[in-house]
Image (cartoon, rainbow, N blue to C red):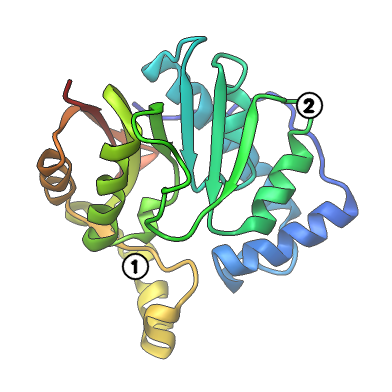
Amino acid sequence: MNTQQTKKPINILSEDENKRLSQLLAIVIGPQFGDSPSEKLQKTLELKSVEAAMLEEYLKPEAYQVLLDLGSGLGVTAKHLSQRVKKVICCDVYSEMLELAQSLNKERENIEYLPIQSYDLSAIEENSIDIVYSLGLFIHFNLYDTYLYFQEFKRVLKPGGQCFLNIKDANELEMNQFLPDAKTYKINGYTTQGLQQWMAPKGVIQIAEYYDFELTDQSVIENPSDCGLYFRLKS
């Protein structure tokens, strides 16, 4: 399943919003984003819109369902999917990112914004979520992070609930992406912001199975190192 570029126009951010976004992106993905994020921002928003359409086509969310968007960022995916479902809960460790997403999506009244701490979804009720998805977050996680989040996924999802996440496939290591991070890692270690982590899909699948999830599909997104994993919690 490969995404394609969309020609749908994207709204331009105001000068203040773009300035604040630059500050937030520096926190989230580090200084490699550059001093002028506007051009890359448009590409990012376009890609996120394509990903949202892809996710909608695959998951086929229903009008009665509640979705959890983990690491929701600017809320592009949440905005798209909120048109199809009862509610989308956007969760992020950066409360300021949630505030910006809320200002960008203020016309969508069925999106909730919830700041969280890492691995802690305790603010979400048990068995209250139909679908949890995470785009562009687990590419920064290792297997320990993944284990802790699946523990929470099992608690908040309803039996039979769906889960999607994408990872960097360690079996398809891209040196042109790995080497710059490795160079920065030598200086900053694990404090490197935006550091990409590669995991073997088999390891992620084993963790999911430990928590009673079954793999329903595994797909390549964009290029061989970007792996999408779809799971369903056993009833």
Q: The C terminus lies in which quarter of the figure?
A: top left
Amino acid found under the numbered disc labelled 2: Glu
The residue that label 1 is drawn on is: 178
Q: In the rendered image, which quarter is residue 1 located in? A: top left
Residue at image coords 27%, 55%: 148
| SS for callout 2 | loop
Q: Residue furthest bottom?
A: 187
Residue 71, given in percent of the width and then of the height, sits at: 50, 48
* Residue labelled with disc 2: 107
The reply to whether dot 1 and dot 2 touch (C-beta < 8 Å) is: no
Q: Position of residue 84 (x, y in %)?
A: 56, 14
Q: Residue at x 27, y 54 (%)?
A: 146
* Residue count near mark 1 (Cα–Cα under 10 Å), binned few <14, some 14–19, many ≥20: some
**Which dot, 1 or 2, sits closer to the camera?**
2
Residue type pointed to by label 1: Phe
The foreground one among 177 and 147 is: 147
